[in-house]
Amino acid sequence: MADDGVGCRNIGDAPESFAGELFLTLATEGRLTVAAEQADEIIAGLERTLDTIKARLCVVRIWHRRTGPIMDDLPPELVQPVADAVFVDQLAPGQLERAVLELPKYIRALRLARRLLPEQRSVPPA
């Protein structure tokens, strides 16, 4: 692992940042279980994140196809979201595409791992 002299790794040395296949395997084998309420909350968050990433990826693709200045032509409320999307793509090229492929695996794994735990099943009505 290369170091920049201040204890930071170089970008090219970053470990794999997704483990969708691993989560799917663990969930399929029953080795990953998550309480239903917690799984539902995580799944909802991942679905929101996936929607945001898809929107950013769309913006980046439009940005790459542009033929002239685009920022000057944008409504003021879109300037920052476009700048953010392009910045993320420049900072970590290809990661938006990978996230669009990997996050659905996490969601599927959590749906498989979603379990009503024994204490959830036996709670008497109030």
Image (tube, grey):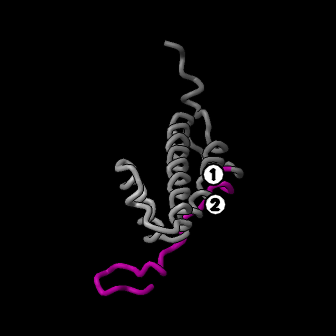
Q: Residues within 10 Å of mark 1 (few under 14, many from 20)?
A: some
Which label was assigned to residue 22? 2
Q: Position of residue 119 (x, y in %)?
A: 54, 29
Q: Earlier in the sequence, mark 2 or mark 1?
A: 2
Q: Position of residue 13 (x, y in %)?
A: 48, 80
| Residue 77 spot, x, y in % from top left | 36, 47
User: Magenta span covers which residues?
Assistant: 1-27
Query: Magenta includes 23?
Result: yes
Residue at x-position 51% and y-position 73%:
15
Q: Look at the image and tell me in which quarter the N terminus lies.
A: bottom left
Q: Secondary structure at mark 2?
A: helix
Q: Quadrant for residue 90, please give it.
A: bottom left
**Is 33 situated above or below 13?**
above
Residue 106 falls left or right of residue 52: right
Question: What numbered label is drawn on residue 104?
Answer: 1
Label 2, label 1: how many angstroms apart (C-alpha)? 13 Å
54 relative to 29 in the view: left or right: left
Label 2: few (<14), some (14–19) or many (≥20) C-alpha neighbours in 10 Å = few
Mark 2 or mark 1, whichever is nearer to me: 1
Front residue of 122 and 17: 17
Q: Amino acid at mark 1?
A: Pro
Q: Residue at x 62, y 37 (%)?
A: 115
63 to 47, vertically: above or below = below
Residue at image location 37% in from the left, 85% down from the top: 3
